[in-house]
Amino acid sequence: MKLQKTIVLLLAGTALTTATAMAQQVGTATAVNPETRTTPPGGATVVLNVGAHVVHKERIKTTPTGSVQLLFLDRSTLSIAPNSDIVIDEFVYNPANGRGHMAVSVAKGAMRLVGGQLSHAGEATVNAGNATIGIRGGTGIFTTKEVINLNGTLTPNNCPPVKRPGYKISLSCGPIQQASAAELSHYVNLFTSRFGQNGGVRGLTNAQLNGLGITPRWYPPTPSTLPTGANPDNVPGPSGAARHPARSIATAATSTAAAATLYLGCPPEIRACLIS
């Protein structure tokens, strides 16, 4: 009789632990280049693989060749650059009413956030250096020293808001300045897989990526190739249309997330990501 009670209690405890772990899952790794390591709260550090669940309070570190893209339940995507250290501080989301809050910390390196439901409601923040940056409706690049707005509004605490795409502000509340084409190009390349990398999807090639709508890297024209008096931040793209580098990054980030999701298959808990 005592043995039966012990077994029942053990099973109940296991079920409770499993339910708690499931409740903490906040997203999925949709692309991972080696090597990226992850440490869940109270767990051991392991290599992060594509398709792995991401949980509340998880810490993710990338090596000089590692990078990762995460897709969250509210359709936010987070791209983590090489040599970075990121923590998912908080993620609470109710899909029924779209309410919740998201908080991410950048301890080292750089990341790009493409906002989902929570940031559109103004319920997303990034902690970087000694600053907390509020995000509304947009896309941004975040480091421990500065933030660059690609779309929407970024507001570091006690600093003026950055509302224009392609503009940046230092986290010491320096003046708002336009990011150069070279700087934006640097980040485009930083968040792009290197030659020979496939994001952890075996057999994925550049041809397949192009077929899924992922644009190739964009390099700003050199002064020698620009027409006289042309603005390097607003030059014709391959189709002849004017192309702003900040908007190019935001568009490429969105298409990359969608393409990775479609290629890998949307996990059961985030199938809503395929619904426009």
Image (cartoon, helix red, strand yellow):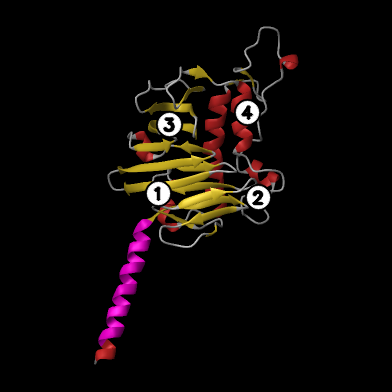
**Looking at the image, is mark 2 or mark 3 earlier in the sequence?**
3
Nearer to us of marks 4 and 1 is 4
Q: Residue 231, image x and y in percent?
A: 62, 13
Q: Residues within 10 Å of mark 3 (few under 14, many from 20)?
A: many
Q: Name the residue under label 2.
A: 198
Front-most of residues 173 and 136? 173
Is residue 86 visible in the rendered structure shown here?
yes
Task: Kindly identify the amino acid type of the residue bearing the numbered disc 1.
Answer: Leu
User: How far, Cα to Cα, is label 4 from label 3?
Assistant: 19 Å
Disc 4 and disc 1 in contact, CB within 8 angstroms: no
Task: Kindly identify the amino acid type of the residue bearing the numbered disc 4.
Answer: Ser
Is 41 placed left or right of 206 in the picture? left
Task: Kindly identify the amino acid type of the residue bearing the numbered disc 2.
Answer: Asn
Front-most of residues 143 and 205? 143
User: How far, Cα to Cα, is label 2 from label 3?
Assistant: 27 Å
User: How far, Cα to Cα, is label 2 from label 1?
Assistant: 23 Å
> Which stretch did the figure color magenta?
5-24
Q: Mark 4 points at which residue?
A: 185
Please, is residue 165 above or below residue 85 in the view?
above
Q: Name the residue under label 3.
A: 138
Q: Which mark is residue 73?
A: 1
Residue extending farthest to the bottom is 1
**Looking at the image, is mark 2 or mark 1 earlier in the sequence?**
1
Nearer to us of marks 4 and 3 is 4
**Looking at the image, is mark 4 or mark 2 earlier in the sequence?**
4
**Looking at the image, is mark 4 or mark 1 earlier in the sequence?**
1
Is 161 placed left or right of 168 in the picture? left
